[in-house]
Image (tube, grey):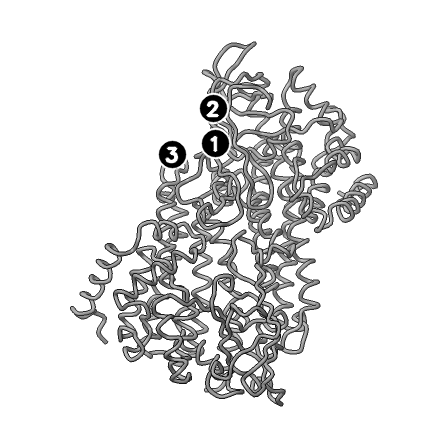
Amino acid sequence: MDFSLSDATRGFREEVRAFLCERLPKDIARRHARGYHAPKDDLKRWQAILHQQGWSAPNWPREWGGPGWSAIQQFIFEDECALADAPLPSPFGLKLVGPVIYTFGSNEQREKYLPKILSGETFWCQGFSEPGAGSDLASLQTEAKADADGFIVNGRKIWTTEAHFADMMFCLARTEKTERRQDGISFLLLDMRDRGVTVRPIATIDSGHTVNEVFIDNVRVPRTDLVGQPGRGWTYAKFLLDNERTANSFVHRSKRDFRRMMSIAREAMANGRPLLDDEAFRRRASRVEIDLKALEWAVLRMLSGEVPDPSASASALKLKGSSIQHEILDLAISAMGPGIIPFYPDTEGGGPPGNLPFWAPEEAPGLMAQYLYRRAGTIYAGTSEVQRGIIYKQLSRR
Amino acid sequence: MDLRPNEQQAMLRESARRFLREEYAFEKRRAYLRDGAGDLWARIAALGWPGAVLPEDAGGLGGSVVELAILMEEMGRALYVGPFLSTAVCAAMLRSVAGGRARELLERIATCEAKVAFAHLEPAARGFFDTPTVLATGGPASFRITGRKHLVHDFAEAEAVLVSAVTSSSQALFVLDPDASGFARRDYKTIDNGSATDLEFDGAAVELIAEGEQTQRALDEGFYWLAIALGAEAAGVAEGALDHTMDYVAVRKQFGRALTDFQVVQHRIADMFVEVEQLKSSILNAMSTQHADRTERRRAALGLKILAGSVAAKVAGDGLHLHGGMGMTDEMPISHFYRRARVIETQYGNSDYFLAAYARLLD
């Protein structure tokens, strides 16, 4: 084993850091650091800047416009971006549908969609979950009826992140009634500007607007927007989720959150000294940091392929990652003390209006909104129960 | 020993539960929070709740912390938002100080005429026991205060405000008329849909009601009542969260079965129940020290405040998780139970703060 980074890799980190220092707009970083959801405009501007540099799709191969980075380089890039408070680019195009399109899509789809994902001109959303199909995704009911030119789609999607500013949706819909439920599902690219699409915001616990319900009423999807083979949608969806084995460890974001927590604890005064000098607090923080360091190496193991079972390990990463994320944020709000009680309106992000208190600690606005929203970490992308089920299933097969 | 509520107490619980279930149902609550609560307080006053928790020596109906806990638990279950808690804590403090002004205010609370807020925490404060820095100057007849108060719950509705401050010689409590001049105010919402206010005093005239040891006694009494009230409210919040979660997992189906058929769900629900029961027992422990010495009572109150926050947040958090995505929505009661639980955990100091205080008293 060799734990050192090569000179070239270290140089790469320096290069990324210098780029972020120079090109990441300060206002975007400041807004993102608060913890509210990044407004569309910030995502768009930042994606355009990355695109100019040729870095907008770190995970894509060179052939399709990616920088051709190794897994370690991608890891370093994401790490530096998180530490610099760069907003996480919208994952739906870059991380999720992009790889599906370049792997299973037609040449026409590749030419039509990939360049605009790279440049950030087109935003995507994911039409998977439905009111009756959450953990049990294969029970989805949205129907796509085939005719001569393509499909007429009807159904209802829920928890659709960023649907309110997405141009396109990649969508799982049933094209056939089959014995095995998974077999009748197809993967469609659906135009959100179609007049049969209605987006209804879902008011969430953090008072922000991130997720939506999407009503799909007789929306026409041309045959050319079916990805791959009909009835193979489930396979593509699994590929898409498998592609991101380390994303749900939240490791980069958690490192950033840990740093924010430490700075809150340094500023907060308890009994006349910084809270960070309090022995009990230091021990709690130490315990979390121990897990966070191990998590980082767990991600590196996964990236190196040094895990006994990639599916089981991906689920383990999500379980550990979501629990570490909660623990860090728990510490942060403990450190903040009574400052978490006021509702701080997101004045720049277009959330509901309201008064700010006269006095608020520097890091208070956005912290609680983020805390509340991240409760979903054990729910989305497979609940903790689903992840445990996957782990056991994988282990029992060996 | 008899841990059962007596007949009046049982009736009080029953009537509070019925009133809140009917008049403060979740959809009505939503409308109150959006459009204002109208005559809700008048109807609560007509039921005599503020007086029901006060003993006869305070002009009340022979009540005690037992009645306080009964009402607060029901309010927690119904996610009640309003000035009851602030007023009850102020009543406890007023009862332990002598003097005409305190007496008069207490009587107005007992007859449900007055709502009173407590301006105690300051911008950098961590919790209830931090020494105030608001400074009172002047003589016995006319004091003026300068300084800042933060997170004054229910200020906007109060007809009088108790303000903790320091004089040149000691800690003291004052009464402020919210219509007086000499201060700036900023009202804002709290994450659990309550309301709070920041105050910046610049020579506001106030009336002295307690100083020196009397202030300490009043704060002790206030904290004891606060802990019982929040502990009981937390029990109501946690039990409400458990009930709503039970209802949800019974009807929500995935993989062709109700969620409640999954053992992993059953076990989590069982753990939620265990936590709720532990909290309820801790309330009894705290109430049993009503007449005990200062340290013992303080310790029981601290213990209850700590369990209140951690149990309510844990149980409501588990309930939120078991609701899946629906738990994240404003539409579902569980997200409100969780937010209230989080505020209870932090109100007047968080668990870390009070655990440190408890640890200092451990022997």
Q: In front: B11, or B204?
A: B204
Q: CA distance from mark 2 to mark 3?
A: 17 Å
Q: Where does label 2 land, which residue?
A: B134
Type of residue at label 1? Glu
Q: Where does label 3 land, which residue?
A: A272
Q: The N terminus of chain B is located in which quarter?
A: top right
Type of residue at label 2? Val
Question: Where in the figure is residue A285, as x and y percent of width and height?
Answer: 39, 52
Displayed quadrant of residue B322: bottom right
CB of mark 2 within 8 Å of CB of mark 1?
Answer: yes
Question: Where in the figure is residue A104, as x and y percent of width and height?
Answer: 42, 84
Q: In front: A232, or B202?
A: A232
At label 3, counting other C-alpha atoms closer than 10 Å, the crowd grade (few under 14, some 14-19, many 20 or more) is few
Q: CA distance from mark 2 to mark 1?
A: 8 Å
Circle 1 SS class: loop
At label 1, counting other C-alpha atoms closer than 10 Å, the crowd grade (few under 14, some 14-19, many 20 or more) is many
Question: Where in the figure is residue B23, as x and y percent of width and height?
Answer: 77, 45
Circle 3 SS class: loop
Q: Where does label 1 land, which residue?
A: B122
